[in-house]
């Protein structure tokens, strides 16, 4: 799958995820979806990201989740949506399932992060 094809599938999957969140009676707002390589380098230097982020390829999005007007910042709150996300396509990955190999800090995860990994 080429980059453009992946971006098209990713966008369709994001639309399905947003509809699913709505159907489950949650609210959401969109966080970062595209990150410039320069911004990725700044985040890396600050210990807040990685240089080869899928955001730079337009294959990642951060979603801010709400229930009854309350912001849900814990990864466990995103779990049903992360599971749904991963069911949409075999290349989809959810940040809440990450372990030390995938994260900036071992044991940390990124529950509001939804991405597609396309083989190089």
Image: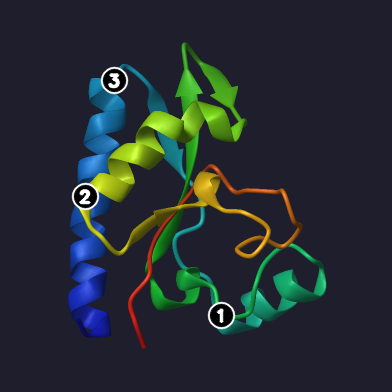
Mark 3 highlights which residue? 24
Check disc 2: other Cα within 10 Å, few if <14, some if 14-19, many if 20+.
some
Rendered residue at 70%/49% (across/down): 108
Rendered residue at 29%/20% (across/down): 24
Q: Position of residue 67 (x, y in %)?
A: 46, 17
- Please determine whether, in this image, residue 114 is positioned above or below residue 56: above
Instruction: Give the number of the disc on residue 52.
Output: 1
| Secondary structure type for disc 3 | loop
Q: Circles 1 and 2: CB distance less than 8 Å?
A: no
Rendered residue at 33%/76% (across/down): 118
| Secondary structure type for disc 2 | helix
Mark 1 or 3 closer to N-term? 3
Question: Which quadrant of the view contains residue 83?
Answer: top left
Question: Which quadrant of the view contains residue 2?
Answer: bottom left
Q: Position of residue 13 (x, y in %)?
A: 23, 52
Q: CA distance from mark 3 to mark 2?
A: 17 Å
Q: Seen in the image, is 38 located left or right of residue 68?
A: right
Q: Seen in the image, is 47 located left or right of residue 66?
A: right
Q: How many marks?
A: 3
Instruction: Give the number of the disc on residue 28.
Output: none
Rendered residue at 79%/66% (across/down): 47
Q: Seen in the image, is 69 located left or right of residue 116?
A: right
Question: Which quadrant of the view contains residue 100?
Answer: bottom right
Mark 2 highlights which residue? 88
């Amino acid at each position: 799958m080429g980059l453009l094809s992946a971006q098209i599938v990713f966008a369709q999957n994001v639309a399905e995820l947003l509809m699913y969140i709505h159907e489950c009676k949650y609210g959401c707002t969109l966080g970062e979806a595209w990150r410039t390589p320069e911004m990725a380098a700044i985040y890396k230097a600050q210990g807040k990201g990685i240089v080869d982020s899928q955001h730079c390829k337009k294959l990642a999005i951060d979603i801010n989740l709400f229930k009854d007007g309350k912001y849900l910042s814990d990864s466990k709150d995103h779990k049903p949506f992360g599971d749904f996300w991963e069911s949409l396509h075999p290349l989809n990955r959810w940040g809440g399932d990450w372990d030390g190999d995938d994260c900036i800090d071992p044991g940390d995860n990124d529950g509001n992060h939804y991405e597609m990994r396309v083989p190089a």
